[in-house]
Amino acid sequence: MSGKVESDPTFRCGRFTFALTRPLVMGILNVTPDSFFDGGRFFDRERALAHAGQMRDEGADLIDIGGESSRPGALPVSESEELDRVLPLVEALAGAGCPLAVDTRKPAVMRAAAAAGAAMINDIGALSAPGAIEACVESGVGVCLMHMQREPQTMQAAPDYGDVVAEVRAFLEARAQACLAAGIARERIAIDPGFGFGKTLAHNLELLRSIGAFTATGFPVVAGLSRKSSLGAITGRGVDERMPASVAAALAAVARGAAIVRVHDVRETVDALRVWHAVEGKVEWEPTLLRAR
Ligand code: 7PJ
């Protein structure tokens, strides 16, 4: 499709293969009543579909659909409720030309999402639920393994590490090994330090400065800082005013080697990354999809 060669690092998810010759932008679509930034905004299905189309047109490489809020203190959602929120969107968007990730911790949701055409499973629990890895093995989905200390209800109470970078990295490497052992190919695995998930501002900054320690594992690194409270702590801005801070954070992550940034503000992030990419003298921005079977 693009003339790029297979020896470039690639990320495989479902029927899509991305050349990692430039950063990928994953647009966030939360279909929850209570997510911290867009909760309630796209709970309505028509609005969710319109927002997905807009993010695709703005240059999103992936759209990450989430039906369970993981904001600090959020309550769990039932399997049937999560399926009701997420599956109709996957079904409606799977043929719309933009690979879909589904943000879930539940094996049943993973299976249903993959069957409906989702290309990637993004799990803030790093596929730790019984049966989660198995749910991802056969379908060919890409997986994002994220680190979290404790659970959403309790994670921000007192985050505590000896060496945050070493501990998060060891955890992610162990989870990646479990995936490899179960039959998920190396090219299908991405890792994510989980900014804000059981981390203080100081932890988040140390992880961000140390993205090189994560890229050194050989797995593509996903960074999700968009609109998070650490950016509010730095700037003094409320969640609705954190777009510039989020763009700066995405750029900082990419400049240190992140392969995928998970963002609310697709257009602004793509513009910033395109400028960075041009300054670096890298090959053209488009296209990054090597092939879709
Ligand atoms: C992340 C996520 C993140 C990955 C959320 C929010 C909070 N998945 N899901 N990484 N954050 N992989 O929407 O900002 O940082 S939920």
Image (spheres, rainbow, N blue to C red):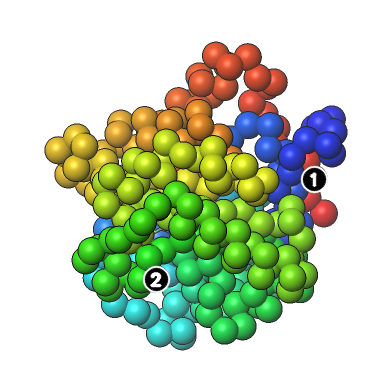
Estimate the x, y position of residue 189 in percent, counting from the top left: 66, 57
Does residue 34 sit above or below 267 in this rendering? below
Does residue 33 sit above or below 228 in this rendering? below
Q: Which residue is mark 1?
A: 291
Q: Is mark 1 within 8 Å of ligand 1?
A: no
Q: Which residue is mark 2?
A: 68
Q: Nearer the viewer, residue 193 or 15?
A: 193
Residue 139 visible in image: no
Estimate the x, y position of residue 52 in percent, counting from the top left: 49, 51
* Ligand 1 - quadrant of the structure image: bottom left
Estimate the x, y position of residue 235 in percent, counting from the top left: 19, 35
Residue drawn where x is 77% and y is 60% of the image? 185
**Which amino acid is tagged 2?**
Glu
Residue drawn where x is 74% and y is 56% of the image? 186
* Left or right, 160 with reference to 96: left
Assess disc 1: are there few (<14), some (14-19) or many (≥20) residues with their C-alpha within 10 Å of its C-alpha.
few
| Label 2 residue SS | loop
Who comes first in sequence, dot 1 or dot 2?
2
What label does residue 247 carry, if any?
none
Answer with the quarter of the image where residue 226 lies: top left
